[in-house]
Image: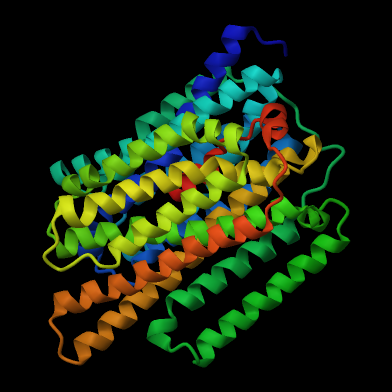
Amino acid sequence: MTMTHRSRWLALLVLCLGDLMIVLDTTIVNVALPSIRSDLGFSETSLAWVVNAYVLTFGGFLLLGGRLGDLYGQRRLFLLGIALFTAASLACGIASSQAFLIGARAVQGVGGAVVGVVALSLTMTLFTEPAERAKAMGVIGFVAAGGGSIGVLLGGVLTDLLDWHWIFLVNLPVGAVVVLLSVALLPEDGGQAAVGRLDVAGAVTVTTASMLAVYAIVGGNDAGWTSARTLGLLAVAGALLAAFLAIESRTVAPLVPLGLFRRRNLATANVVGVLWAAAMFAWFFLSALYLQLVLGYSPLEVGLAFLPANLIMAAFSVGLSARLVLRFGIKPPLVVGLSVAALGLLLFARAPVDGTFVVDVLPSMLLLGLGAGTAFNPVLLAAMSDVDPSDAGLASGVVNTAFMMGGALGLAVLASLAASRTDALAGAGDDPLAALVAGYHVAFLVGAVFAAGAAVVGGLLLRTGSPVGAADEHAPVAAPAAETACL
């Protein structure tokens, strides 16, 4: 189907609306977590599953969603993903128990993964001329980064004025509009089902392995890190991961061709992405709890507290970070950005019980927004800089999966560390609020170590070749899933 210049940009608008739903859902939930915890009776560690259930299925189905789009048609999969995400949002909105909410969040993650990765593939298909493609990817990147700011504000407003259920129900009218516009504006494509095979075994094994590993880590504090349950779950997860590698090495059409990881910059970007996402998820999750449970902020005030960081992140992700890469290459902006973010987390690790916004919150938020906005695009460009054009989409999916899985695992580890420290101090007779803050301090400190480690890995292992060619040819400068993972 031949599309005019105008119809391509109208189609991009539809894709941006779909991506906006996914980004909003990520940040809007963070603001409402304390209200969800209070209403449904979550513990501090089990509350992480409201995030993890979504993140794990999102990360687990990114690669599979892209492959399904190739086989059965990207437009068809985009519509399916939006419909599934919208239906799961309704289920979340009417949830009255922990299990129901977590299950609905897992289904949301599947729909979100399909929407995110297929929207990126469709954009690459719609815009083939390098300059137009770069411009289109910049628009999607702006929506992904700027949507985080809308999410924290909207989450605060809805939770304050109505209740937390409405952070999910707000997706219903948006989803209906996106479905109608998709039918009218997105081009038909038949897919390649007749010539391709679906690696179901690979998708099932790697997703199950990730879920079991995070479940073991989240429950490690309660069950004991050396208990039979924890060690048994980790052993099963390891066996499933080994099975996944064996499947990928033998199957005709692997979900992830293992030879791709021999590309040095792609492999390094994945390690950096895991460490960086672990630090970023801890920031959003734990700082929202600190602001509400320690400083007594309302959900709306939490949203406003995050606004400066999100605005800076959006501004740098869209244009300024790209200019820095063009001027200095991949490595310096990445190392500086991650180091600045590590400093922001270190400042949070000293936030007191009686902290104030201007002195104890705002400086950390500004540094984290600046660091994240500077580092996002270099990480993605690093992944793409030595990948053949035919592998660009797969490489983008791989690095986005690393972001999502790193975030889930990091959040599980840091939430457990915080709870363990808090329980130990409370058991020793410390003031409960002081013990809670001390637990957050440990988690922020370890998060800072993750971010600093990502900077060191990037600085030591990344090749210094210019990414400009990759940026111009493939333009995966702001992949939505990676932006979503960290907002």
Q: Which is more toward the observer, 298 or 380?
A: 380
Question: Quick check: 447 above or below 284?
Answer: below
Q: Quadrant of residue 264?
A: bottom right
> Is residue 472 left or right of 278 when viewed as pictured?
right
Between 240 and 104, the residue placed more toward the observer is 240
Q: How many marks?
A: 0
Is residue 28 found left or right of 136 in the rendered image? left
- Image coords of residue 159 (percent x, y): 20, 46
Q: Quadrant where the N terminus lies?
A: top right
In this view of the protein, which residue sits in the foreground, 482 or 255? 482
Quadrant location of residue 246? bottom right
Residue 302's x, y, as percent? 21, 49
Nearest the viewer among 473 and 126 is: 473
Q: Residue 167 appears at what percent x and percent y?
A: 29, 44
Relative height, residue 257 to residue 474 (above, below): below
Q: Residue at x 56, y 46 (%)?
A: 332
> Is residue 259 left or right of 460 when viewed as pictured?
right
Snapshot colouring? rainbow
Q: Is residue 98 left or right of residue 245?
A: left
Q: Is residue 350 above or below residue 232?
A: above
Q: Answer whether residue 417 is visible to the viewer in this image.
A: yes
Q: Residue at x 27, y 88 (%)?
A: 424
Residue 67 in view (yes/no): no
Q: Position of residue 421 (x, y in %)?
A: 30, 82
Which residue is at 53% across, 64% downward?
453
